[in-house]
Amino acid sequence: MSTASENQEAQRVYWDGAGGDKWIKRSADIDINVAPAQQAAIEAAGVAPGMRVLDVGCGCGGSTLALAQKVGVGGKVVAADISHAMIAIAQAATRRMPQVDCMVADAATRDFGAQKFDRMFSRFGVMFFGDPVAAFARLRRALKPQGRLTFVCWRPLPENPWMLTPLAAVCKHAPRPQRPGPEDPGPFSFGDPARVRRILTEAGFAAPEFTKFDFDMDLALGRGLEAAVETASNVGAASAALTDQPPEIRAAAIAELRKELAPLERDGSVLLGAAVWIVSAACG
Ligand SMILES: C[S@@+](CC[C@H](N)C(=O)[O-])C[C@H]1O[C@@H](n2cnc3c(N)ncnc32)[C@H](O)[C@@H]1O
């Protein structure tokens, strides 16, 4: 079992390296695919003109742009991410928005200074802390007393066919990747509300509220079956299962994936269900 600091360092190396590069290649598609969840979470956050907002794990800045429009030029969005490459993209995307400051920062350990935030927001960026209680406790100290934290995270894998269906197809041929431990960081690590409630309350937040939000993701984005196969085999657990597999296993797994997705294609789109929590907690 890895320690919290080993987990944290592994995440930093991943996101500031190969994981970040992979995300960047798909970030325009990701922005489109997760737009409904982002919009629901930003509405839940109650971001208003003039507010100071921290965008945690902002990636390439998709959510930062939307938050910046909400706060207007009289507000401020500080967009923080551990990846140098992603922050460079976020910086370029928001260069005409004086209300945005982008910074390379480990949100788990960074001191964000004396000027506190009205809101903390994250689109899928807070599930990767090595020691989540310590990280959220530190983040909470950067919130104003009336401030709120709102983030969107995945519900468990079985509720997310966009990820489970490709994984199940690929794993008819390739070995299933090792399941992460219940306290390990990772994209599905905040699926259990009891765990998230414990982390946030131990970090000093008031009891969090959990709202289910369901939407469809078009793995093809209107570009047809092959685009869906390409996406599904290059993201998340299915991609991990295919890594380092010999060509014949890869070919069989991808053929299986194509067979599974083909009946779902309609007019170039391949829709699969996605399920998230929108989590909101007052500073406490
Ligand atoms: C799943 S990606 C989501 C990116 C972006 N929010 C989006 O929705 O496109 C997770 C993001 O969290 C960032 N991240 C992970 N751990 C972090 C940390 N300790 N501090 C800041 N950012 C972190 C990663 O670099 C990555 O950009």
Image (cartoon, rainbow, N blue to C red):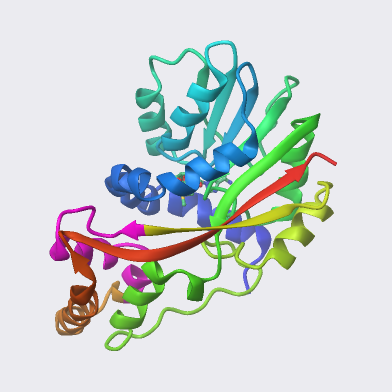
Q: Residue at x 38, y 18 (%)?
A: 95
Within the magenta stretch, is there residue 109?
A: no
The x and y percentages for residue 245 are 25, 79
Residue 54 or 40: which is nearer the viewer? 40
Question: Which quadrant of the figure contains the N terminus?
Answer: bottom right
Q: Quadrant of residue 227?
A: bottom left
**Residue 16 appears in view:** no
Q: Residue at x 44, y 16 (%)?
A: 97
Report whether 222 appears left or right of 179: left
Question: Which quadrant of the figure contains the C terminus?
Answer: top right
**Residue 198 appears in view:** yes
Extent of the magenta region:
217-241
The x and y percentages for residue 34 are 41, 49
Report whether 234 appears left or right of 51: left
- Which residue appears farthest toward the front when viewing the image? 267
State whether residue 64 is above or below residue 215. above
The x and y percentages for residue 151 are 60, 46
Report whether 195 appears left or right of 225: right
Residue 132 or 172: which is nearer the viewer? 172
State whether residue 182 is above or below residue 173. above
Q: Quadrant of residue 53?
A: top right
- Which residue appears farthest toward the bottom when viewing the image? 172
Q: Residue at x 69, y 46 (%)?
A: 280
State whether residue 2 is above or below residue 40. below
